[in-house]
Image (tube, rainbow, N blue to C red):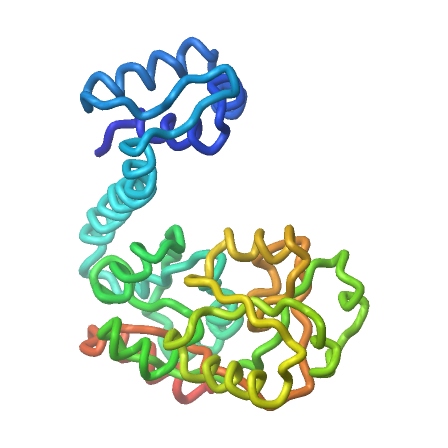
Amino acid sequence: MYNPQLETFLRVADAGSFNKAAEEAYITPTAVIKQINLLEESLDMKLFERTHRGLKLTAAGKSLYQDARYIIQYCRDSVTRARNAMQEGDPVIRIGTSPMTPAQILVELWPEIHKQCPEIKFQLVPFENTPENAREILKNLGQNIDVVAGIFDDTLLDVRNCAGFEISRSPLCCAVSIHHPLAEKSVLQVSDLYGENLMMIRRDWSHYIDRLRDDIWQHHSQIHIVDFDFYNVEVFNRCENTNDMMIAVREWANVHPLLKIIPIEWEHAIPYGLLHSPTPSETVKRFLEALQSIV
């Protein structure tokens, strides 16, 4: 479906070394170098600067790096869509899942849903949570993925042209490294955050989080807000590595093993539920009706 040398390219770029990439792939450094050389020849461009200090991406390499993960994931998704096409006659709910959109809530509710809809089956469809994938998946809900669990608000629904089914209001909590002094607490006071860096997603992503941001600016200026652009695993890594705190929800408790999600004594919360197509299939409608009677 795509040039497999792209995966080797990504591995080398992340490792910064042919030898390290070879160890991760369980092949020889010579084989890795040969794949990169072939890729550069086929594309007619230089992807790496080879120096005595290691490898450095060229401008072309940086550009390709940004798109390669999306290309690979899109190709994998196309295979999933093809497999799903074989099951079009079956009543199947395809649930998109990623570290930031875990399907645990549906797994817990499924026994009750199954009682009402014994004919419906569900299928987990994993995907990489990148901005590109998120836009593509939410814009095309109902094609290869029917529902995605996560936090949302009206702004996101309008921008992504999808609908939301609210299951609960999830309190906005703080993610902290297990090595952070505050990690020993089971509940935080707002004053515990004074003097801390608090990572928050940029303004206009969610008006619920914007409301929290304004509250902090107006009443808790001792908290230093640090902006970021998108919730993904890299942001969770950054939170753990820097020892900063980060706004999160309890449903993300298992995203990173070295982070702890701690509730805070405030009233801020955000809708949590399912995102689905504005024109759901009959199977999805039946599924949502069952879910409505349960929650």
Residue drawn 31% across the image and 25% down it? 47
User: In what quadrant of the picture does the N terminus appear?
Assistant: top left
- Do we see residue 210 in this rendering? yes
Q: Position of residue 79 (x, y in %)?
A: 24, 43
Q: Position of residue 118 (x, y in %)?
A: 37, 72
Give whichever of 214, 13 is nearer the camera. 214
- Do we see residue 283 in this rendering? no
Give whichever of 161, 107 is nearer the camera. 161
Residue drawn 43% across the image and 77% down it? 273
Residue 32 in the figure: left or right of residue 94: right
Give whichever of 278, 38 is nearer the camera. 38
Q: Position of residue 249 (x, y in %)?
A: 56, 73
Residue 16 in the figure: left or right of residue 147: right
Residue 219, by quadrant, is: bottom right
Residue drawn 22% across the image and 16% down it? 41
Count numbered badges in the picture. Answer: 0
Q: Is residue 15 above or below residue 148?
A: above
Residue 242 in the figure: left or right of residue 18: right
Residue drawn 60% across the image and 55% down it? 256
Residue 209 in the figure: left or right of residue 256: left
Give whichever of 162, 155 is nearer the camera. 155
Q: Is residue 47 above or below residue 210?
A: above
Q: Position of residue 177 (x, y in %)?
A: 70, 59
Q: Is residue 1 above or below residue 154?
A: above
Residue 261, by quadrant, is: bottom right
